[in-house]
Image: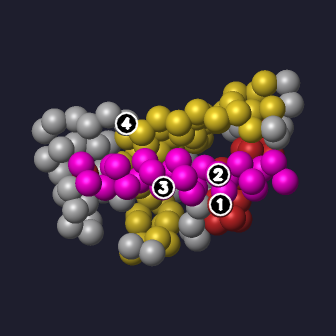
Amino acid sequence: MTAIPDIVQTLIFKAPIQKVWEAVSTQEGIAAWFMPNNFQAVERQAFTIFSPYGDSPCVVKELDPPNRLVFSWGKDWMVTFSLKDLDGQTEFTLVHSGWSEDTVTEVGETHTVVRDRMNQGWDSSVLPKLRAYVEQ
């Protein structure tokens, strides 16, 4: 299996860390900028992201409020949200990992194809929605 680079994006939000944490670690917050879900902030807790492409099973892997949340997404991916307090602003880093050239997703497309689409989605749609949500 040949690894494909992780999607890594870091942004600075003009919002306090607690506000950003609540946006990325609560069911309501995640639904407001990402997708409907039944997330609960409990380690090893299974939850579902209700995507237009189908329901994705997820599991909370790591929880360190208000600095880090890691969860599995579908059968292959890990998503990490890292937050750092910058005196009233928040540095937010997304890492979307688990990509492999030889792997096909649940919807029958290769990771090579899906990674580019996902990277563009994070960049052009999802993270701007998160910024708008926390900076309002």
Q: Main secondary structure of the magenta part?
A: helix
The residue shown at (18%, 51%) is 103
Magenta segment includes 131:
yes
Q: Earlier in the sequence, mark 1 or mark 3?
A: 1
Q: Earlier in the sequence, mark 3 or mark 4?
A: 4
Helix, strand or loop at mark 3: helix
Residue 26 at what x, y percent from top left? 68, 57
Which numbered disc, 4 or 2, marks the residue closer to the eye? Answer: 2
In space, the residues marked 2 and 3 are separated at their CA atoms by 10 Å
Q: Which mark is residue 121?
A: 3
Q: Earlier in the sequence, mark 4 or mark 2?
A: 4
Quadrant where the N terminus is found in the figure: top left
Within 10 angstroms of label 1, few (less than 14), some, or many (20 or more) residues? many
Helix, strand or loop at mark 1: helix
The residue indicated by pointer 4 is 6
Helix, strand or loop at mark 2: helix
